[in-house]
Image (cartoon, rainbow, N blue to C red):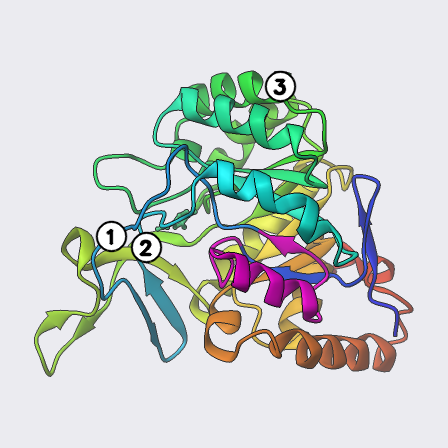
């Protein structure tokens, strides 16, 4: 089955891509994504300067999910800017994930990376792992001010990666903020921030940074991800494309994201566990599910979740 999708006028040869952060820091990792079955190459969230990140252990899988506190290890935006032209030769969209340690950084990086013409820019408002820095997406005023400044300097399609919200009041608060920016897509959700995974044998937290607190991913966050995809799909009446992220382990999980309103899906914890071979497996599984249910494409089932 043809699993290609179009988001903001950009064609993705498959609706599956890596989630920012998963196996996408180095040139080698990005090239491996280029040669893989992934429908796009999403970069690690980039900062002004290169970073080594937080002390290890900082990524640990566990049954049902993963916890991480990477601390934004990345090559710095100049290195990614220099790589984009080459990465585009793989014939799939290149998505630049832009972060920053302060508001001005986002604007500086977005302006510079935009000049390298990635196919899309995903502005990350939801890194939970920098000690002392709250997730921007939980502050509507800061989010609006920052995004308005970034939007002014970005000419390629621009979206925002948001943290999960846990109350409809928060979805309703954020939707008008996002609506005023002129966004081309949303990526939902980033990890569920500041979980704590404990090993009762060693009586220790499983990761070192932040006293063991880190972002949760994988199967355990899927219902939170689906709820956020669905909530924003409804608030924007299906008119703002959504890339769903969270708990995509099988083709069925991806199908659930599509039903809730996602146009495409990103894969984090599963990509970390399985490597880029997951994209062919997920594509085969989703293709089989769509076929069995009589859908002709990912777009054909988008948003068609029925309520009881
Ligand atoms: C990191 C984690 C995130 O969830 C994110 O959005 C950005 C960066 C990290 O710890 O590197």
The quadrant in which the N terminus is found is bottom right
Magenta span covers which residues?
20-42
**Which one is earlier in the sequence, the residue at label 3 or at label 1?**
1
- Choose between 190 and 81: the one closer to the eye: 81
Q: Is residue 118 visible?
A: yes
For the residue pair 124 and 288, the one nearer the viewer reads as: 124
Write the residue at 18% across / 71% down: 198
What distance separates the C-alpha of mark 3 from that of mark 1? 30 Å
Q: Based on the picture, tell me whether residue 108 belongs to the magenta stretch.
A: no
Do the residues under discs 1 and 2 have CB atoms within 8 angstroms? yes
Please give the name of the residue rendered at 30% of the width and 50% of the height, measured from the top-left corner: 52
Q: Is residue 41 magenta?
A: yes
Mark closest to the chain's N terminus, 2 or 3:
2
Q: Is residue 168 visible?
A: no
Specify whether tag 2 is near ligand 1 (CB below 8 Å).
yes
Q: Quadrant of the C terminus?
A: bottom right
Q: Position of residue 110 (x, y in %)?
A: 56, 28
Seen at 45% across and 44% down, the residue is 163
The residue that label 3 is drawn on is 153
Residue hosting label 1: 54
Outermost residue toward the left in this view: 203
Q: Does the beta carbon of the residue at mark 1 sit less than 8 Å from ligand 1?
A: yes
Residue at (24%, 52%) from the top-left corner? 54
- Give the crowd class for mark 2: few <14, some 14-19, many >=20 residues within 10 Å: many
Q: Is residue 62 left or right of residue 152?
A: left
């Amino acid at each position: 089955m043809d699993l290609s999708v179009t988001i903001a006028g950009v064609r993705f040869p498959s609706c599956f891509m890596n989630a920012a952060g998963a196996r996408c820091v180095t040139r080698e990792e990005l090239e491996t994504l280029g040669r893989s079955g992934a429908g796009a190459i999403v970069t690690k969230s980039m900062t002004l300067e290169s970073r080594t990140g937080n002390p290890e252990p900082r990524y640990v899988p566990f049954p049902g999910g993963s916890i991480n506190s990477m601390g934004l290890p990345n090559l710095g935006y100049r290195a990614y800017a220099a790589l984009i032209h080459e990465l585009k030769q793989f014939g799939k969209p290149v998505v630049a994930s832009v972060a920053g340690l302060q508001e001005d950084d986002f604007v500086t990086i977005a302006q510079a990376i935009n000049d390298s013409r990635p196919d899309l820019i995903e502005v990350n408002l939801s890194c939970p792992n920098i000690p002392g820095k709250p997730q921007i997406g939980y502050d509507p005023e800061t989010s609006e001010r920052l995004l308005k400044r970034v939007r002014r300097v970005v000419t390629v399609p621009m979206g925002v990666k948001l943290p999960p919200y846990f109350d409809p009041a928060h979805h309703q608060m954020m939707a008008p903020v996002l609506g005023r920016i002129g966004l081309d897509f949303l990526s939902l959700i980033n990890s569920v921030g500041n979980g704590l995974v404990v090993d009762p044998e060693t009586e220790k937290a499983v990761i070192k940074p932040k006293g063991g607190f880190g972002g949760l991913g994988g199967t355990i966050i899927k219902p939170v991800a689906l709820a956020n995809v669905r909530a924003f799909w409804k608030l924007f009446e299906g008119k703002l494309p959504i890339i769903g992220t969270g708990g995509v382990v099988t083709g069925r999980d991806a199908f659930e994201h599509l039903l809730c309103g996602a146009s495409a899906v990103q894969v984090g914890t599963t990509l970390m566990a399985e490597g880029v071979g997951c994209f062919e497996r997920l594509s085969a599984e989703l293709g089989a599910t769509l076929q069995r249910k009589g859908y002709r494409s990912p777009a054909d089932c988008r948003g068609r979740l029925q309520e009881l």
